[in-house]
Image (cartoon, rainbow, N blue to C red):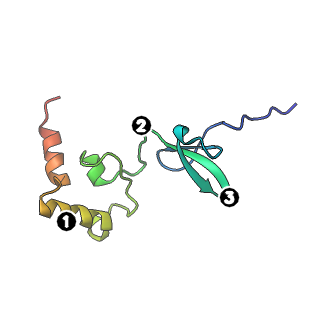
Amino acid sequence: MVEKKKSTQRSQVGFGSTYQKGKAGNAEQGIESVLGGQMWLVKPDKEAKAATPCLWMQAGVVKFKSCDNYYDCTSCKYDHAMDQKVAKGKQISWQAAAVSLREEPR
């Protein structure tokens, strides 16, 4: 006999999110989304790990950012935006954060 799967069975799709089929009105279990004409509940995973973490994430400046530019920071829009924030004094640079990580006693 073939066993039937539960309709609430979770599956991993994408980076750092858990998707499950849901019904409208179950927003307390996740964020309601419509994908492919079906209702899904999206719940961000607490301990998500990026396959290719951005330099800003590796230095500890941002919590989660995956690199989608093959570590070519010179042509990366995200890196340029973060550099502008650093220039305005609103953000610490990834270089300064990396130095402070190396200097911390373990």
The percent position of residue 94, horizontal first and vertical second, equals: 20, 53
Instruction: Decide which of tag 2 and tag 1 comes sooner along the chain.
Output: 2
Task: Identify which amino acid the numbered label 3 is placed on.
Answer: Gly
Label pair 3/1, CB-CB below 8 angstroms: no
Q: Which residue is mark 1?
A: 84
The quarter of the picture where the C terminus appears is: top left
Q: Nearer the viewer, mark 3 or mark 2?
A: 3
Q: Which residue is mark 2?
A: 47
Q: Residue at x 16, y 60 (%)?
A: 86
Task: Identify which amino acid the numbered label 2 is placed on.
Answer: Glu
Q: Is residue 103 left or right of residue 20?
A: left
The percent position of residue 39, horizontal first and vertical second, equals: 64, 50
Residue lying at the far top of the rendered structure: 106
Task: Identify which amino acid the numbered label 1 is placed on.
Answer: Gln
Residue lying at the far bottom of the rendered structure: 75
Instruction: Decide which of tag 3 and tag 2 comes sooner along the chain.
Output: 3
The quarter of the picture where the N terminus appears is: top right
Q: Which residue is mark 3?
A: 37
CA–CA distance between discs 3 and 1?
A: 39 Å
Q: Residue at x 40, y 61 (%)?
A: 68
